[in-house]
Amino acid sequence: MGGDFAPASEVGGALIALSKLGRDVEIVLVGREDVLRAALDKHPESKGETRLSVLHAPDVVTMSDEPSSIVKGRKESSLYMGLDMMRRGDADGFVSAGNTGGVMATATMLCGRIPGVSRPTIGTFFPTLTNKPTLVVDIGANVDSKPRFLHDFAVMGSVFAHLMLGIERPTVGLLNVGEEKSKGTEVARETHELLSNSTVNFYGNVEGRDILKGTVDIVVCDGFEGNIVLKFAESILTFLKERFKAYANRGLLQKLTIAAFRPVLRKVLSGLDYQEYGGVPLLGINGVVIIGHGSGSPLALSNMILRAVEVVRKDVNGTIQRALHEAAQQKDLP
Amino acid sequence: MGGDFAPASEVGGALIALSKLGRDVEIVLVGREDVLRAALDKHPESKGETRLSVLHAPDVVTMSDEPSSIVKGRKESSLYMGLDMMRRGDADGFVSAGNTGGVMATATMLCGRIPGVSRPTIGTFFPTLTNKPTLVVDIGANVDSKPRFLHDFAVMGSVFAHLMLGIERPTVGLLNVGEEKSKGTEVARETHELLSNSTVNFYGNVEGRDILKGTVDIVVCDGFEGNIVLKFAESILTFLKERFKAYANRGLLQKLTIAAFRPVLRKVLSGLDYQEYGGVPLLGINGVVIIGHGSGSPLALSNMILRAVEVVRKDVNGTIQRALHEAAQQKDLP
């Protein structure tokens, strides 16, 4: 209910997902029943769909609500009730286009962490010049991360990239200001040391330019710089669109030129549209949580649901637990 | 001598600059005399130019030299000898397209800081959707900056934007992961508090997306995230060029389409070419230092020289000293 186009995108997304999923998957729409029923009525194909049900939640968490306040004061919200279903074991996964910080905080408090995880994290995919995206982790869930947290982000990212993207031994780069291990903040230098002697396939330091270049499969960083780079990256498309628009406004010839070129631009720039990647995992939570852009389309929501199903089926969380156990056995982690 | 196209760009740039400067400015080319004389011979207009002279420096610092080693071991390098001229008072400013870290470290050690400055810094301009660029400071000179350092970056950036860009009361934003003052790292929160009660025109926190949007005149951040964002930003042009090239390679029609739109692309994307801004100031050094991209063209070098002359004439350093003195009087700085 907390997404920008809720519940139209959510209801539409659930129906698209069901059309691609087998009989063994059920989707529960959590939110205000009257609103959800009205949205379902617009989809004749939902009639008689036995895999779809509604759980009434009278309250809605908005984007401006304080994340930490939800567990205590918003127990009748769709966000809380959906995550609580998962805590009780009545659901295997949870998908939301709502308040990201709220989902993160509530999921952590209700479901706890996977044993061995120091801090849960959120990663996101960046487009690259190679044929596979780079997973940047963390993109804002944690600030002032200690080296041990960054180590765990690296392990969790590696498991995710291995199971979900099919990369045999994903390479991990540490986001820094230079290649040498002596570079960067105190935390970055300690993390370099920790990752150098870890179970992950550590490439070494990478720089800002290596993200789009696709130098490594996973870029590990604190959520402070991760969030800053992500928001900078998301703003590029708007920047370029405005520049092309300003060019078109110079005169008729320029307007026609840009109009003729629009299909090419759309194609080439689509890789910069972060919406396309629809849904990123919350890693380290003792439960499967996929969160996406508030303005997600029905297609984006359906991709998030399909991704959640895949995370459950491939036992990403169990694998993370085993990987961190193995890392701890090999080395005394700080 | 340390630039990628040295000394051709430097010699060419000096001659362009002299053609735009009055009789009261002299330029000294510091480097290997034979190489410089040979480069000058390619420019007939340099004959009889009394404002141009050569100071022989047998050694050259390269991009891979360790910055901190230059003061001790490279006293015959063009980098050291040029900065030493300034230290002795024989030059008012120093311009280089060489090893940035080397210039920073050597200038700090030889010339010292402007009284009151906690840490010298390097800023750079980012293009924006408004008609003026945003100055991001620091972009890599300092990591693990304390709030007091970030405060001084804000003051120095404000003086520079006021005197050099003619902005009456430049607005300062603190790069962070959210607008609220409670957001971000411990350092970010303390800096927010410090800037809120300072002499600078503090806008509040800004996010990654605000840089290209041009929300504020100056974005203050630690050199760790500043450098990461800068290198990410510099990689966008390469990324887009490769994407357009890949599109062109799909077939003849696509190749012709891209060829037809090349002039438009060049025009629109030029704002993303950081070379265009030619030269950023090293702020806080007791001397005027302008550094630029290693691959700078003669035009870029001439712009750097003109900028150095302007920084001297407008007494940017004297104004920084007075502004920090005023800030310290208004409030006990940490």
Image (tube, coloured by chain):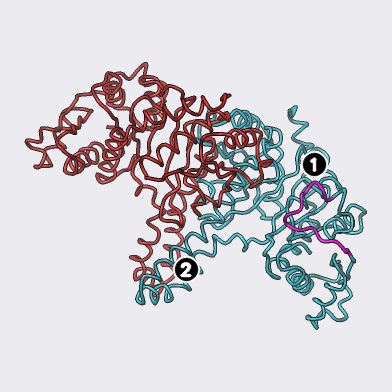
Chain colours: A cyan, B red
Foreground residue among B69 and B140: B140
Quarter containing the C terminus of chain B: top right
Position of B19 compared to B127: left or right? Answer: left
Which range of residues does the magenta coloring cover? Answer: A57-70
Q: Give the x, y percent position of residue A159.
A: 71, 47
Q: Give the x, y percent position of residue B201.
A: 51, 41
Q: Give the x, y percent position of residue B297.
A: 28, 45
Q: Can residue B18 be seen at all in this image of the molecule?
A: yes
Give the amino acid type for the residue marked by disc 1 in the picture: Arg
Q: Can residue A318 be seen at all in this image of the molecule?
A: no
Report the chain holding disc 2.
A
Q: Residues within 10 Å of mark 2 (few under 14, many from 20)?
A: some
Q: Was residue A62 drawn as part of the magenta stretch in this picture?
A: yes
Q: Closer to the N terminus: mark 1 or mark 2? A: 2
Badge 1 is on which residue?
A322
Give the amino acid type for the residue marked by disc 2 in the picture: Leu
Quarter containing the N terminus of chain B: top left
Foreground residue among B302 and A126: B302
The secondary structure making up most of the magenta span is loop
Position of B178 compared to B75: left or right? Answer: right
State which quadrant residue A203 falls in.
top right
Residue A265 shows which numbered tag?
2
- The reply to whether the C-beta atoms of the residues labelled 1 and 2 are less than 8 Å apart is no
